[in-house]
Image: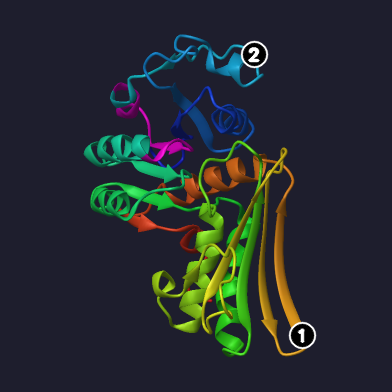
Amino acid sequence: MAAANSDMRVVIAGAGGRMGRMLIHAVAATKGLALAGAVEAAGSAVIGRDAGELAGLGANGIKVTSDVAVLLKDADGLIEFALPAATLAFAELTAAAGKVHIIGTTGHSAKEEAVIAKAANRATIVKSGNMSLGVNLLVALTKRVAKTLNDDYDIEIVEMHHNKKIDAPSGTALMLGRAAAEGRSINLAQHSARGRDGVTGARNAGDIGFASLRGGTVVGEHSVIFAGPAERVELTHRAEDRMIFARGALHAALWARDKKPGLYSMADVLGLADI
């Protein structure tokens, strides 16, 4: 990797997408970071285009390419908000090169998660279902409240996103569910209620419920509801601009630069792991 007193050089994957363009824009505005390259899938219409122009910054001389391995040779790390299958390909390359890998992609299966964990033996990976600093504080608070309140308080997680989102519950909702389950010392997979329709019977004690709403252009809203006897405690986060995810990812990249290989979370980045 580059010397610690020089800018951290990062490759942005999914450069032609909404988050990719936002990340390129954010890198240009962030002290200590420099754009090392921009990547898109082979055959993409943006291959060969100037990354700066794509991001609305004006030409920066960096052309979008599909050859990640070449870019990683002169980079310190890679940041991606992509598709689950793409993450696995990127993880193989960052592991081989021993680089930092920031994963903002969601929707990975248990098998895919295992592949990522194995790659972390050689790459420094920060993976989060949501890169927002505020959301990760919400996750820590959820764990704490779940631990403090007893089983008389039912836990329900409600999330809403734009009508183009393809996975449900959202990665953030699942993060919140895992945090609540950890607070209660239970297994989320055994206490997860993800759909109610028709005559379902009474709510199962100890379940953590999920409700997913989709519509319009909502960036992201998440609420964790603790419904107890005659009172409710609600923790809510509303994202108003996707730039918060880009800033969080860049914050994670700078944090990870001098860390040993391993699989980290935003809780590690923010020092919230022990809350």
Labels 1 & 2 near each other (Cβ < 8 A): no
Query: In the displayed structure, would residue 39 be above or below residue 157?
Result: above
**Seen in the image, is 111 located left or right of residue 101?**
left
- Quarter residue 3 falls in: top left
Closer to the camera in the image, 157 or 130: 157
Q: Residue furthest front?
A: 199
Q: Amino acid at mark 1?
A: Glu
Which residue was labeled with disc 1? Answer: 231
- Is 175 in the magenta? no
Residue 111's disc number: none
Q: Position of residue 113 (x, y in %)?
A: 32, 53
Q: Amino acid at mark 2?
A: Gly
Q: Position of residue 238 (x, y in %)?
A: 72, 54
Give the residues drawn in magenta, as a range. Answer: 70-84
Q: Which numbered disc flags the more N-terminal residue, 1 or 2?
A: 2
Residue shown at 53% from the left, 84% from the top = 205
